[in-house]
Image (spheres, helix red, strand yellow):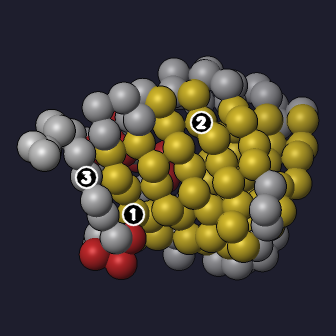
Amino acid sequence: MSEKPGLQHRCWSDIPEEAMKGTITRRLISAEHMMIAQIVLKKGDDVPRHSHHNEQITYVLTGKLRMLLGEHGEREIIVGAGEVLVIPPNLPHAAVALEDTLDVDVFSPPRQDWLNRTDDYLRKDS
């Protein structure tokens, strides 16, 4: 059987962690039409309000995130271990880790700003 172009078989532990804002780290795997990221946050880490044209699915494996949704964070949703939040394109959102958290984020299409490292909102300590 010949290999299909784009076929990948990866192990998270083989992908280098990228240090981000605070103590946040991430690992990425990208395909043509989607991207998956493993995000590790320590209690108190925050992801500043931002939005993007990508559809996003956030799956919390361990820990708990406070998600603030809307232009002024007017909707709050706590996402705990085993829970999933679907964020539609262009919806402003922010996050705060209420506990040490491991989450998996899926984006479609892939986040170009993450791939080319122009995601300054997540790279600066505020």
Label 3 sits on a secondary structure element that is loop
Quarter where residue 63 is shown? bottom right
Which residue in the protein does label 3 denote?
A: 8
Residue at the spot x=28%, y=75% of the render?
A: 14
Residue 113 appears at what percent x and percent y? 35, 37
Q: Earlier in the sequence, mark 1 or mark 2?
A: 1
How many numbered tags mark residues here? 3
What mark, if any, has residue 27 been given in the picture?
Answer: 1
Residue at the spot x=65%, y=77% of the render?
A: 42
How packed is label 2: few (under 14 Cα within 10 Å), some, or many (20 or more)?
A: many
Cα–Cα gap, marks 2 and 3: 21 Å
Q: Closer to the camera: disc 1 or disc 3?
A: 3
- Amino acid of disc 1: Arg
Q: Earlier in the sequence, mark 2 or mark 3?
A: 3
Residue 88 appears at what percent x and percent y? 67, 25
Q: Earlier in the sequence, mark 1 or mark 3?
A: 3
Which residue in the protein does label 2 denote?
A: 56
Q: Is 107 on the left or on the right of 66, as rendered?
A: left
Instruction: Give the quadrant of the C terminus.
Output: bottom right
Residue 81 appears at what percent x and percent y? 79, 66
Label 1 sits on a secondary structure element that is strand
- Using the image as rendered, state which of residue 75 and residue 124 is in the foreground: 75
- Amino acid of disc 2: Gln
**Residue 36 versus residue 63 in the image, above or below:** above
Residue at the spot x=45%, y=49% of the render?
A: 36
Quarter where residue 28 is shown? bottom left
Residue 104 appears at what percent x and percent y? 57, 57
How packed is label 1: few (under 14 Cα within 10 Å), some, or many (20 or more)?
A: some
Residue at the spot x=80%, y=55% of the render?
A: 83
